[in-house]
Image: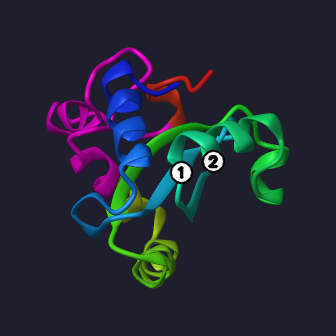
Amino acid sequence: NIGRFDLQWIRKFDKQKGHMGMSCFVYMLLCADDTLYTGWTTSLEGRLEAHNRGRGAKYTRARRPVRLVYWEPQPDRRAALRREAALKRLPRAQKLMLIAASPRTQTPSGTRLSEACRAGAMLERKDYDVR
């Protein structure tokens, strides 16, 4: 459930592995039970499909469907693992602020999360539906 622009950009990055030296990604998924999952991959599109087919992480298998809400390119596997570990240490509120600040983040209705934050909306389950 990512926008057409994001999917085109992701495919372009996946095809051009090493473009600007970036071949890995760190990402966050919003699960159906409103939890966040953080991971890393070399193919965002493939990894998102794997999570939604139940072939991704054990954590997301029982929390489908999942939705890509944040991702950032990393120069290599080592950097991706470091960034993943740093993101996993963040409290949920800080993760939501990071997601809201991302220019690529969209809510299901198409409204940018950062716009919702500026409007004073709370990023809680009652404010947007992930299904």
Q: Secondary structure at mark 1?
A: loop
**CB under 8 Å between callouts 1 and 2?**
yes
For image coordinates 50% across by 53% down, the residue present is 28
Q: Is residue 92 above or below residue 65?
A: below
Q: Amino acid at mark 1?
A: Ser
114 with respect to 62 (left or right)? left
Q: What percent of the width, then of the height, locates residue 30?
A: 56, 43
* Quarter holding residue 66: top right
The structure residue drawn at horizontal position 67% and vertical position 36%, both measured from the top left corner, is 49
Residue 108 vs residue 68, the one in the foreground: 68
Give the number of the mark in front: 1 or 2. Answer: 1
Residue 50's x, y, as percent? 73, 43
Q: Image check: 83 left or right of 34?
A: left
Q: Residues within 10 Å of mark 1 (few under 14, many from 20)?
A: some
Considering the whole magenta stretch, tell me its main secondary structure: loop
Instruction: Quadrant for residue 127, please give it.
Output: top left
Q: Quadrant of the C terminus?
A: top right
Q: Residue at (57%, 27%) from the top-left corner?
A: 130
Return the residue found at the far left. Answer: 118
Numbered label attached to residue 97: none
Residue 119 percent coordinates (x, y): 16, 30
Indicate the amino acid at tag 2: Arg
> Where does the magenta region start and end?
97-124
Q: Name the residue beneath numbered marker 1.
A: 43
Please name whichever residue, 18 or 49, is drawn nearer the observer in this view of the structure: 18
Q: How is the image coloured?
A: rainbow
User: In this figure, which residue is indicated by the disc labeled 2?
Assistant: 47
State yes or no: residue 113 in magenta: yes
